Each structure stands twice: as C-alpha cells, then as structure tokens.
Amino acid sequence: MQPSPHMTGHSYALPDMISHLETSLPNAAQPVLCETELVAVLVSISNNTPHILTLDHGRSFPSGPLTVEHRSLQKGMRNWVERQTGLKLGHTEQLYTFADPLHGRGHQMVRISYMAFIRQNSEHTLAERSIYDYFPWEDRRAPASGPLLQAIADRLRHWAQDNAHRWQRCATTFGLDDHGWNDELSLARYELLWEAGLVPESTWQNAPLLPGLSMHRDYRRVLATALSRMRAKIRYTPAVFDLLPQQFTLLQLQQAMEALAGRFMHKQNFRRLVQQQKLVSRTAEYDTPPQGRPAQLYQFAPQTAEHCYLAGAKLPLPAIS
Amino acid sequence: MQPSPHMTGHSYALPDMISHLETSLPNAAQPVLCETELVAVLVSISNNTPHILTLDHGRSFPSGPLTVEHRSLQKGMRNWVERQTGLKLGHTEQLYTFADPLHGRGHQMVRISYMAFIRQNSEHTLAERSIYDYFPWEDRRAPASGPLLQAIADRLRHWAQDNAHRWQRCATTFGLDDHGWNDELSLARYELLWEAGLVPESTWQNAPLLPGLSMHRDYRRVLATALSRMRAKIRYTPAVFDLLPQQFTLLQLQQAMEALAGRFMHKQNFRRLVQQQKLVSRTAEYDTPPQGRPAQLYQFAPQTAEHCYLAGAKLPLPAIS
DNA sequence: GCTATATATGCTCTTTGTGAGTATATATAG
DNA sequence: CTATATATACTCACAAAGAGCATATATAGC
C-alpha cells in the first residue's frame, strides 16, 4: 500500500464548532425537523416510447410519506408503491434528494426521488405519458425533432449573443456545430434551456417558450435526471430487460433501446453485439407478427450477463438539419 | 414526435389511497418528521493518494444539521462546510440519501451525503486518511494488492462454494478468471464483501476479516459510493482539476488520475490524449524538481474543456484489463 | 403461384482508439 | 560525466465500432 500521512490514529485538535458536529446532533435549541416524502418516477415502455406513470394530468409523480416502519428507504419505497399500485418494480435506483424551503411551519420539506422500471403491459390505474411529451427535442427518431432542434439552436444563439464560452456550452450539450449528439446529456440540456429562459419553469422568460409539458415543483427537472440516468444505465447494465416482457424478439429489444436512447440503431451491428455477449438465450417459441416471418423469442440470460455493454449500439442518425 | 397513448389530459379514476397521495401529505394523524443531516465526504490528494477529511480517528465524516435558511441542499452544504472549515469546495455532487430507522423518539434520521473535491495543499484542521486505508484492495498500484486480491479470491471462492451464479458475480466484480478489473465497481466490490461476511460491518461474519479501516454507521459504504463516483466522474468531466493546484505538471496530472483510479498508466499515451484534446494550456513557468529536467507547468483550459464535458472527449484512464 | 414484409444470417470493408514499444533530444543536480 | 526526469516523435498490432452488401427464410394477402 502507498504510505499515507496523518495515520497517527488521533485527529487533530478541533475548533469547538467542529467537535460539536462530530456528535451529529442538530442544534439543541431548535431541532430542525423535516417532512420527508418519497417520490417515484415509474418508467415503462409502450408504443415504442418510454412512458412515465403520472398523477394530476401528467403534472405530478406518485409520492408518499416516509413512514416509521421502513427499514431502508429503497425497501420502503418499493413496498409502498407495490402495495398502492399493485405494480412489481424492476430495476430501482435513487435519483436525487431535494428540499423546498418554505412551508410556513417551522420545518422544511425533503423529497427523495427514485426511478423504477416497470415491465411492459403491466396493469395499473395511473395515467401514462410519453417522456418525450415533456422533452420533445430528446427524441431524435421523430422527424419533427430536426426543425425543433434548429429552432432551439437559433434561440440559444440569440441568448448566447457574443458570449463565446456560453455558446460553447450550448454547442456541446446540444450537438451543434460539429459536435455530436450525446443522449446522456438530457439533464444538462434541460438545465441550459432553464438558464436561457426557454421553459416556463425559468425564473425569467426569454421570447416564446419551447413546446413540452410542464410539471409541478421541480418534477420536470427530476424527470430530466431520470432520463439521463436511464440512458446511462442501460449502456452497462442489463436493466432494459426489466422493461421488456419475459420473452421478447430481438427487434423488440432493439426498439426498447432505441426508445430510451431516442435514436435509431443499425440492426445488424446491434444483433452482433447482443449475441456475441450472450446476453440472451433463444426459447423454443416464436412471435407471430401481423406481417412477415415469425420472430424467434428470446429471454434474458442473467447468469452470463452480470455486466453487459450494450453501449456499442448507439448509432448516429443520418445527419439532421 | 411519436404519438403516445393516454394523452387525453385526464388521469384515470384513482383508488382513494392514491388520490390521497396526490396531495403529498403525510398521514394527518401522525406526521412523520425526520431529523435531517448533511454529511460531507471531502476528498483531496496528498502523497499521490486520494485522502478524505475525517473526524473521530477516521471513523466519521464532518456532518451538520440541515437548517432552515438553506436555499438548496447543495448550496446549504457548501456554505456550511466552508464556514466551519475555511475550505473552498471544488466539484460537488450529491451521493446518496439513507435513513436510520430507530431513534427512540417518534422520528427517523435522514442523512444526505455529498462528495466535494478540495484543492491540494489546502489548510485545514481535520485529519486526513488515505481512502485506500479503508479499501486496500482498490489500490492496484501497491505491490501488496496482488497477494491481497489473491486472498480475497480464495475466500470468495469458499463463500461461493458450488453456487455458480454467485461465483460469476465475484469474478466479474473483482476481475477474476479472465474478466478485467473495472475500477468503477468499487461499491459493488464492497457490497459483495459485505454479503460474504468478510468486513466487520457485516451482520454475520465468515472467517478472518479483511484488512481495512472501518467507520461509524453506514459511512464506509458511503465512502465506497464516493470512490465509485469519483472514478466514473473524472472520466468524462474535468473534475480532476479541482484537486490539483492551479498550475501543475503533466506528471502531476497523470499521478492524480492514477491515484484516483488506483492504477498506473502509460505515460506517452496519456500525454498524447491530454494534449490532443486541448484540455490544458502551457504556462510560462516551470517546476524545478529535486532531480532531473524542470517540468513545464500547465493550467486547465476551461474554454476548450466545456467541450470535454462530452464531445467524446475523455480523460484517459486504463481500460478494463 | 407471386409479392410485400420482416426475420435471420453471413460477410466485407474502413476508421478509430488504444495499448505497447522504441528512440532520442533536452535540462538539471551532483 | 552520469543519473534522472522531462519532452517529443514515431511505429506497430489489435480490437471495436460504424457502415454497407448480400441472401436466405417464413408468413400473409392477392
């Protein structure tokens, strides 16, 4: 091992304030208590598009209070959502914790957000909304995304004016000039649009706003975080399989990846990659489509796929303009 | 845009329980309040090794209560740490939020952990500990890591017994058999050792424990999370530069990357990559080492490195091997 | 039968990135 | 003059990725 300094086993003498912190106690005079809420971003795929399960006309996520019996936050969230909605949750991860300052009473509100995958065709009573209804520019598969991106570029250029550094940021996050489009930067893109005053949540507004549904509180930002995370996650974990039926065709798998990435991929290369990594194993069954040759059904092969790299499957679309 | 179903603008009729949740109110009879604490994992590099700033003989992180005046959690944490320790914080990110169930009184304890980078040679009064004192197996630069990893492999093999799937997990996360070592999996490795009962925090124990300092509560797990995150982060953001002095030699930069990754790198290739991406610009000054030719001092070039944010530009790190 | 459609498979190419090696100036201390 | 470390310039092999071409095969509808 590399030797490291300060290994005497005793910490230095500390100023009072810090020694106090060591006890991890809130100020005894005024213990700061928070209402704490768990927020669930539930994702599933239908119609070749990623959807979220929403409340209040697409403006809110399901959420519930943290209760005392919860052993861990994640377990608590899972149990709670499964009991309330009857849904089985697949891949689950914590997204972000944020606080609302106000709340007239003497305490804050802390919200802990989670993202969870839900298998296709699950039964539930929540309203599904396409994620791309909130971020139309993120779906580069749509023909309309070309002109939309052009319009965004124009407004960003106007916002950046002569500020070269600011324009650099716009160009790299939105894949302008000769930069490439990076699908994992959806959070950065949303934040940039927020800064530029092009979304209704901005504290100031700048010219006509962009299309796209808005949400309560910071929820649209949470959704952008979720989109970034899921796009990153499916690259190097087998999480996609929690969105698909137990058995699926290779085209379904590819389309699920395309739905999440918001881009089309090269079919032959995709299959080559998937199969040479032994991510899936074929079943005896076939899927009969309305037209064309029946497709072999596959299933996820978890034993050989502790870590997988579906990354190579991110193909650029024919250059848009 | 892809058309998406359920766009009627009205959510379905909801069961009572869920409509209730929509209001985001905790059970009126028993509002669940939490003590909320901010935990800071402060990282800096000294002696070519990543260190954390600790309290209580290396067993605890600085932490403090969330107070009412904080506008955002991140801002609150920054202000609080900077006021208490006098340190300037560089790259900061939220790590994870976790809860302790007990606390005799009627409420839980919620801890929100952050990681922040601190520039080399900063003045402070906290005790520094090498991160690799907590996870000796994570520093593959150390000669001792070879035998240690061998010993770990043996004990994991014993734990896995004939459970092939379990051994698969061990092999891929620890780079055994013919799998490569992936430095970003440090959290997964810690969790696996925890499961196998090889660390003192495990709820059960299995044969002699591994070397490595322990910490209070879940803090060692938080530290493993921090290590994973920082290794992932420096790959595609210029965050490393917040750990180095304003001016540095290319060797210093390489050694900082090596320290975080826990691996050695090929000097010529490293320089080739750094320079062709224009991440740094040379200054007029030189560093005079005790021996050898003076090294040119460089500085971070933020204008071209927003571009580094991800135009496919990555800081070189050893690939998995 | 034929056609349209979509699955399934095999095979080239080129380009890029990367890991690794060799060689050789150059500047300083002792 | 030597040891040391910076700095720079190459080459080479190899794998992976992006892209294209070709061709079976199986179904439905006409």
Image (tube, coloured by chain):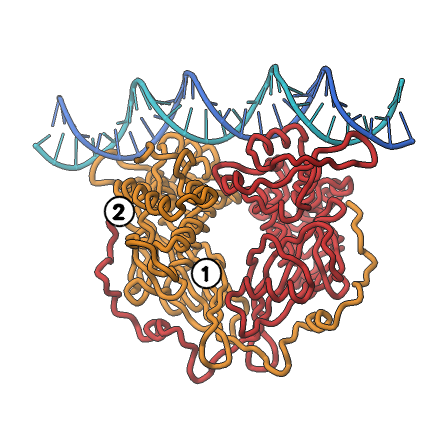
Chain colours: A orange, B red, C blue, D cyan
Q: Quadrant of residue B302?
A: top right
In the image, residue A61 lies at what x, y percent?
37, 64
In the image, residue B94 lies at what x, y percent?
55, 58
Res. A14 in view: yes
Task: Pick the quarter of the image with the N terminus of chain A.
Answer: top right
A138, B282: nearer the viewer: B282
Query: Which residue is pictured at 80% across the width and 52% down the height?
Result: A5
Q: Residues within 10 Å of mark 1 (few under 14, many from 20)?
A: many
In the rendered structure, find residue A67 and report the number of the disc placed on it.
Answer: none
Label 2 and label 1 in one chain = no
Q: Quadrant of residue A128?
A: bottom left
Side of B195 where A127 appears, left or right: left
User: For mark 2, what is the residue?
Assistant: B2
Query: Which residue is pictured at 59% across the width and 64% down the height?
Result: B77
- What amino acid type should be assigned to the residue bearing mark 2? Gln
A165, B253: nearer the viewer: A165
Q: Residue furthest bottom?
A: B29
Res. B167 in view: no
Q: Count the marks: how many?
A: 2
Q: Are marks 2 and 1 in contact (CB under 8 Å)?
A: no
> B146 above or below B119?
above
Task: Pick the quarter of the image with the C terminus of chain A.
Answer: top left
User: For mark 1, what is the residue?
Assistant: A114
- What amino acid type should be assigned to the residue bearing mark 1? Tyr
Query: Which residue is pictured at 72% across the width and 60% down the height?
Result: B214
